[in-house]
Image (cartoon, grey):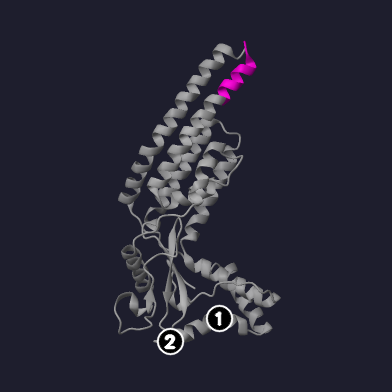
Amino acid sequence: AAATTRRAVENAGDVERFSEAQVARALESVERDEIAGLADPKVSLGGNYGVQMYRNARFMAGVTPIVRRYLVVKRRIARVRRKVKHVDREGYYDERTAMWDDEHEKAAKDIRKLFNKMGGLYNKLAQDWATRDGLLPQAWVDELKDSFEAMPERPWSVMKKEILLSLKEEDVTPIAPTKQGLERYFARVDEDALAAASIGQVHLATTHGGDRVVVKAIYPEIRRFLMADLINARRAAQQITTLLRLPVKGTVDAIMDEQVESFPRELDLRIEARHLRKQRLYQRRHGLDIAIPVVLEELSTSAVLTQ
């Protein structure tokens, strides 16, 4: 088992020993696969109609009160406009701004609580929205910036089961076939997470060859909930931007369309592994001294990345 793992580590780091011609051929092969559409195999996102309906109901229960409050504010502003706009235009605009700002502050806290409650993809969306200064109400942006803080880690019992299931389902050859459970692939995996993020977490591990590696694993429910969550988030963004008559509605819609396209790709760690290897090839070609993780493809899957 130790010899097998050692060969895996050596093979993963072989880019440093490539000649210039080998680097050129490897890059050509990668780019050819990308052009042909062979580089990013489709990953099953799982989920079913029942799961989607449950997520839809849970999300709408949280977002509907927010939308209703905005509608109330909108009607109040309309009444104020009819009464004072032609009498005190400046006073009307000041009062209108104050009313919207007050509701934005309340909504921001509720949106943050809702995203935290829903978890998974919504934490990822919160991080993305927190970077959209000028596109969304500033109160939302400021409140969601807290989403970059450390995420709570999942129990090891959950992650251990998910890592083992992914390795088995994608037919990863065990390094130590006589062992049981996760020890068939790793000599040891630290139970405490090294770090936790919005869609997964990482654990330090030791291979059967004695090398210390990092194992990144996607949370088990993320793929099951993905499509329902993306549809809900896009619908909510469209409703609120239409309701507020934001001048950047088209931009927000474009951002959500981009997320619907790009987020599923983030749930396939084989794509990340390919990009890491490609970057190491470019680094070798140009003689750059940059530390880039070495992927152990023999211990990686679409949901587990070992490096």
Q: Residue at x 46, y 61 (%)?
A: 267
Instruction: Name the N-terminal-most of marks 2 and 1.
Output: 2
Magenta: main secondary structure? helix
Residue 228 image point, x, y percent: 40, 49
Give the label on residue 4, or none. Answer: 2
Residue 32 in view of the camera: no
Residue 31 image point, x, y percent: 61, 71
Q: Residue at x 43, y 45 (%)?
A: 115
Give the label on residue 13, or none. Answer: 1
Seen in the picture, residue 240 relative to 175 is either above or below; the reply is above
Q: Residue at x 46, y 41 (%)?
A: 235
Which residue in the rendered view is the most extreme toward the bottom?
3
Q: Is residue 94 magenta?
A: yes
Q: Nearer the viewer, residue 62 or 238?
A: 62
In the displayed structure image, the side of residue 12 where residue 62 appears, left or right = left
- The stretch of residues the image draws in magenta is 87-97
Q: Residue at x 57, y 73 (%)?
A: 277
SS assignment at label 1: loop
Under mark 1, the amino acid is Gly
